Image (cartoon, grey):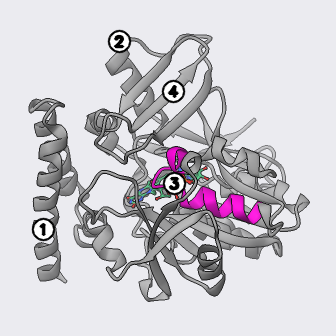
Amino acid sequence: MTLTNNVGNVGFKCIGCGACKGVCPKNCIDIVEIGRMGLKPIIDMSGCINCNLCLDVCPVNDINKRENISKSMKIYNGISKNHEIYYNGASGGIVSSILIDMFEKNKIDAAIVAFYNENFDFYGDIITRKEDVLKHSGSFYLPVQQLANIKKIKNYKSVAFVGLPCHILAMNRVIKAMDLKNIYIKIALFCCGCGRMKRGTLDLIKFKYGHSLRENEKILEYHSRRGEKRLFSQTSKIEILTNFEKYEFLYPEFLDFVDYYYYSEGCYNCKRIYGIDADVSVGDDWGKDTDTKLAIISCNSELGIDVIKDNPLLQISDNPSSLIKSQLGGHFRKHKLKNHIIMDFILISFYRVMKLLGYLPFRFISNRFRNISLYILRVLSTKIR
Ligand SMILES: Cc1cc2nc3c(=O)[nH]c(=O)nc-3n(C[C@H](O)[C@H](O)[C@H](O)COP(=O)(O)OP(=O)(O)OC[C@H]3O[C@@H](n4cnc5c(N)ncnc54)[C@H](O)[C@@H]3O)c2cc1C
């Protein structure tokens, strides 16, 4: 077996979307995490037939281009009216509500959402029943090989695809390369940076619990952002259940761990935040002052407007504020600062100070600190723009 780590010149720019692996007709590509540096596609050259399909679907040269946010046709705020969906959802369960409603109305017979296996690898899972939507809800802050199972969607008539902005771009390329006609809707999650990788998350377990996962320890359940509140409360948690133990991290703890900012090199090459090429893009409304969950929803096509407006599970209101305002920190980070290290330094220092001050005043201080930081960023970014 001959292995190479070069898919064209992708190298460490890989964002681990899994599109190359998913389309490879010989199944000879794998994506591996190399320490904290990032992800790399590895090809078994003895199986490769040089069809170039992997290069055709790779989005690394697309993610570096800015989005045309004038494509956003309508912006709403919203949450799910259904308490179980709200509780399990990252920002109030908008994405899950759209999927459940579309299954109920028979608009789709399958959806690609994110999931994990017992080895803590994350990939795009195909679900075919509304009952499975909530098992897959929440935000997994790791690179997810969302298109790794893409060949299987040929078996379905009408499919909803959920993914980060990079996944949406990869999906657009796959649709072209595989001549797919059955993608009914694309739903994007805003993303200002993917978050720590698998290695970083396992390091966090070691940091808090004093030991790594044991030899036969298997991941049974992973939940993130489950709870009544959004980020800084005692109820918003990342929970990892294994056959040995339950690991729990409050959201501030998860953010505070310095490794959070060592994300895949490929993400540093990305200027996409909103996934504006999807029919609907959903993010968290960071512009608000309370800690209750609330999503900001950008409808980018007529279909996108319909699935939001005609959805009985949603409680929505018009949002006159701009998309950029809701993601100002991330926008600044991705568009204005060429050298991300400065921004990372500021953010790491911020969370370090929060830690020094202790978790009790965290919430009180962080809300005010966040508002002041946002104000400064707003002023700065207006000046730079
Ligand atoms: C890595 C990452 C970074 C993000 N960064 C930001 C940000 O900077 N600003 C912001 O406003 N919002 C960000 N979000 C989006 C936010 O966390 C919520 O996912 C979004 O607001 C939708 O919330 P919801 O309650 O409607 O989704 P839910 O109803 O909880 O549904 C979420 C859906 O997304 C799928 N999913 C979860 N994780 C991933 C993943 N890694 N890749 C692909 N699909 C996934 C789930 O399977 C589920 O179907 C990010 C999300 C992720 C996963």
Task: Give the structural element (helix, strand or loop) at label 1.
Answer: helix
Disc marking residue 15: 3
Q: Nearer the viewer, residue 162 or 344?
A: 162
Q: Where residue 234 sits: x, y (%)?
A: 32, 34
Q: Where's residue 31, x and y in %?
A: 61, 44
Report which residue position mark 1 lands on.
375
Q: Amino acid at mark 2?
A: Gly
Dividing the picture into quadrants, the one containing residue 381 is bottom left
Report the span colored magenta: 86-103
Which comes sooner in the sequence, label 2 or label 4?
2
Query: Could you tell me if residue 59 is visible in this image?
Result: no
Mark 4 sits on what residue? Answer: 240
**Which residue is drawn at the image coordinates 66% and 52% (left, top)?**
113
Which of disc 2 and disc 1 is earlier in sequence?
Answer: 2
Relative to 156, 138 lies left or right: left
Q: Quadrant of residue 147?
A: bottom right
Of the residues shown, which amino acid type is indicated by label 1? Tyr
| Three-letter code for the amino acid on which mark 3 is drawn | Ile
Q: Residue at x 63, y 87 (%)?
A: 302
Q: Is residue 2 left or right of residue 356?
A: right
- Quadrant including the N terminus: top right
The numbered mark, 1 or 4, whose residue comes first in the sequence reads 4
The percent position of residue 76, horizontal first and vertical second, equals 45, 75
Q: Identify the residue under disc 2.
A: 210
Asked if the magenta segment contains residue 87, the reply would be yes
